[in-house]
Amino acid sequence: MNYFAHLHLAYLSNTSLTGNLLGDFVKGSRLSYLPRELELGIRLHRSIDSYTDSHYVSQQFKSGFKEMRRYAGVGLDILFDHLLAKQLGINYNVLCQKFYKILRDERYFYQAVLPADYQHKIYLITTDNWFASYSSLSGIAVALKNTGKRFRKPVALEQMLDWYTANQASIDDGFKQLYYDTTQFTLAKRDELNALLD
């Protein structure tokens, strides 16, 4: 899952939005130096990534990208944010603004323990309204293209949109199942991690 999906899952599970995004910015398994809610969020983020990567829907989707299978997961994560925005409909923009406010507030509150690269990324996300573009295919095309350029050997991730437009109904249905299953997993995993961290 990509940034917006992780934030939405944090919101649904009533866990820290900052903690759930930090999973991409904090390395290692020793996290007890962090506030408990951030540690919980990081561990939840990592569990969600493992779960969705191995889910049969993700595996089925990745199988269509044999030539760039190594990078397909990255592209799918970005596309999933678009599919989630589409699924949320009119609530999407409201949630974006709510998430921006929480992230800005938590960035200030946890400033002493947040990595500099995370703080910079959150500044860009909240100032430039990154998630606004996720609701349109043209916005996702730009995100896919820019991400593909960051690899040592550039990958045309935006080609995924041809696959999506050709198989839209079945991909939308598959994503709905994946996201439902991931939400149920997230709620159960949150309870499991809370018990372990007590």
Image (cartoon, helix red, strand yellow):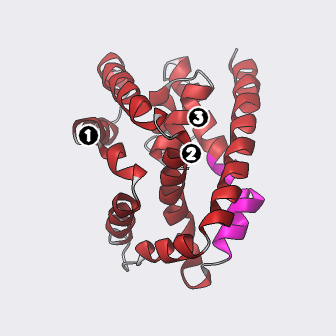
Q: Position of residue 180 (x, y in %)?
A: 71, 42
Say which of marks 3 and 1 sits in front: 3
Left or right: where 192 falls relative to 11: right
Q: Secondary structure at mark 2?
A: helix
Point out the tag, 3 or 1, that comes first from the N-terminus: 3
Residue 176: x and y in percent read 68, 50
Tell whether position 198 is magenta.
no
Residue 87's disc is 2
> What is the magenta range?
49-63
The residue tagged 3 is: 9
What is the quadrant of residue 163 in the picture?
bottom right
Question: Residue 49, image x and y in percent?
Answer: 62, 49
In the figure, 83 relative to 110: above or below?
A: below
Circle 3 packing at 10 Å, graded few (<14), some (14-19), many (20+), is: many
Residue 12 locus on image (x, y percent): 60, 27
Q: Disc 3 marks which amino acid?
A: Leu
Quarter of the figure with the C terminus: top right
Residue 101 versus residue 106: which sits nearer the camera? 101
Reading the image, the residue beneath label 1 is: 120
Please state which amino acid type lies under the numbered disc 2.
Gln
Q: CA distance from mark 1 to mark 2?
A: 29 Å
Dividing the picture into quarters, in which one does residue 189 lie?
top right
Confirm whether residue 123 shows in the render: yes
Precedes in sequence: disc 1 or disc 2: 2
Q: Secondary structure at mark 3?
A: helix
Q: Is residue 123 left or right of residue 83?
A: left
Residue 27 seen anywhere in this rendered image of the structure: no
Q: Earlier in the sequence, mark 2 or mark 3?
A: 3
Which of 100/190 is in front? Answer: 100
